[in-house]
Each structure stands twice: as C-alpha cells, then as structure tokens.
Amino acid sequence: MLYRTLELTVAPALRLAYQPRVTGLANVPRTGPVIIAANHVSFADEIFTPLAARRQVIYFAKAEYFNSPGLRGRAMGAFFRGLGQVPVDRGDTRSAAASIDVGVDVLLAGRALGIYPEGTRSPDGRLYKFRTGVARLAIRSAAPVVPVGLVGTRDVQPPGDKRWHRASVEVHFGTPLDFSGREADERSARRLRGIAEEIRKAIQALSGQEYVDSYAGSGATGV
C-alpha cells in the first residue's frame, strides 16, 4: 500500500526533478523473480534503482531501522515495513547467513530482490570485492541476476550529507545472468567466488568504476 502510494506521488516528482538516464530497462522482467544486483555508492541507490526499474524492489535493511526506540523509531520501522524491506543484523554473521534464506523466500514469491554484493556502501566511490551471498541466492532461487550500474547517485547524496543535491543520475541495467541448474557449485568456495566475480565484472562494465580487490569496510558482513 505504501509503495503504491509513493509510486503514484513521489516517484513522478523524482523522475521530473532528476530525469535519470536509464538504459537496458528491457532487461528487467516486468513480473516474476529477479535479483537486482548493483554497485552501492549512496543511500539514494535504493530510491533510483526501483524508480528506474518501474517495479517494487525488496531490499535487506539494517535491523536498527526497525527497532529504534521512541515515536520516531516506530515511525521509521513502519515506513520500512511498508516498503517491504527485510531487516538483517549486519553485525551478526549468523543473521546475515539467515538473510539468504529470507531472500530466497522473497524470490520464490515472485518478487524482485535488490542486493548490493559489496555488502556495504563504497567508502570512496570505487567498486570493492563482492561477497558470495549473491551467488548463493542465484543458485538456490534459480532467479536471473540483472546487473545494475549506478552512476551519479553519490553526488545526489554524498556520504555524511543528509541533504539531496541536483545531479545527473544514470541507471544501467545489463543482460540477465542465469545460474540455474548449478546447485553443486554452492559446495565449492572457488565456484561461488567465480559466480560473484562474473556478476562483479558485469556491474563494473556498466558503472565504469575502478575496482579494488579487497572488501569495503572491515566490519561489514552483508550477503
């Protein structure tokens, strides 16, 4: 209900104000399960990706967004639930692993699941090493993975700045990647890494970012 309301009110205003350049929209299935795997440089990514995809995208969100104290905390929790976001404790490895099962359930329900394989926002705008949760999701759900390259969202909301700025935004959807029928690969760390790397290279080709062969943020668990 909340998502539909925002789609009819806020989304048109954002499209008019920013006029994001969108390519490859035909690669996003209009219905059915799909993993939307993107680079992550700004909080604004979670706004512009579904805005460009023109369908609801479910994301994993920090657990504290759902259980903060006080009236403001309850309002924030209600807002994220209304958007269909899924809480995950990013500081708890077991919770992060369990989120993969939740993500599979979202996909089996025919929804679009958004994931940032870096596990956290890039600290400097470069693309960092992917975690293998995206590979496990793709194998277990058999859902196609649509790579997404976001450009300019870091300028819309720079790190540490709560204000939004006018900037040129680009959202590039790549050719879907199919990892169905590869259940045996989940038992191999090397093959999981290979799948994550294939997705990473597809996203990097779309975003044009410099790659850093290390994880972004020492404390991020992500999926």
Image (tube, helix red, strand yellow):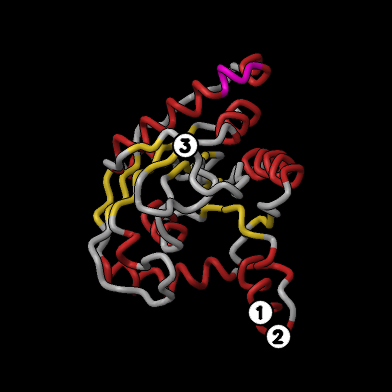
The reply to whether callout 3 and callout 2 are in contact (CB within 8 Å) is: no
How would you classify the magenta stretch by its main secondary structure?
Answer: helix
Mark 3 and mark 1: Cα distance apart in space: 37 Å
Task: Specify few, some or many for label 1: CA neighbours under 10 Å numbering under 14, 14-19, or 20 or more.
Answer: some
Residue 112 visible in the shown view:
no
The residue positioned farthest toward the bottom in the image shown: 71
Answer with mark 3 or mark 1, whichever residue precedes in sequence: 1
Q: Residues within 10 Å of mark 3 (few under 14, many from 20)?
A: few
Q: Earlier in the sequence, mark 3 or mark 2?
A: 2
Determine whether 35 is above or below 166 in the image: above
Which is more foreground, mark 3 or mark 2?
3
Which residue is at 42% across, 63% downward?
44
Circle 3: element type: loop
14 left or right, relative to 29: left
Q: Which residues are magenta?
A: 188-192
Residue 92 x %, y %:
73, 49
Helix, strand, or loop for circle 2? helix
In the picture shown, does residue 18 fall above or below 211?
A: below
Residue 65: say if magenta.
no
Q: Residue furthest front?
A: 218
What's the mark number on residue 75? 1
Which amino acid type is marked by label 1?
Ala
Query: Is there CB contact under 8 Å for labels 3 and 1?
Result: no
Kindly identify which residue carries mark 3: 214
What's the CA distance linking mark 2 and mark 1? 6 Å
Which x, y percent locates residue 40? 43, 51
Please give the residue where the numbered disc 2 appears in the rendered image. 71
Q: Position of residue 188 (x, y in %)?
A: 63, 16
As helix, strand or loop, the secondary structure at mark 1 comes to: helix
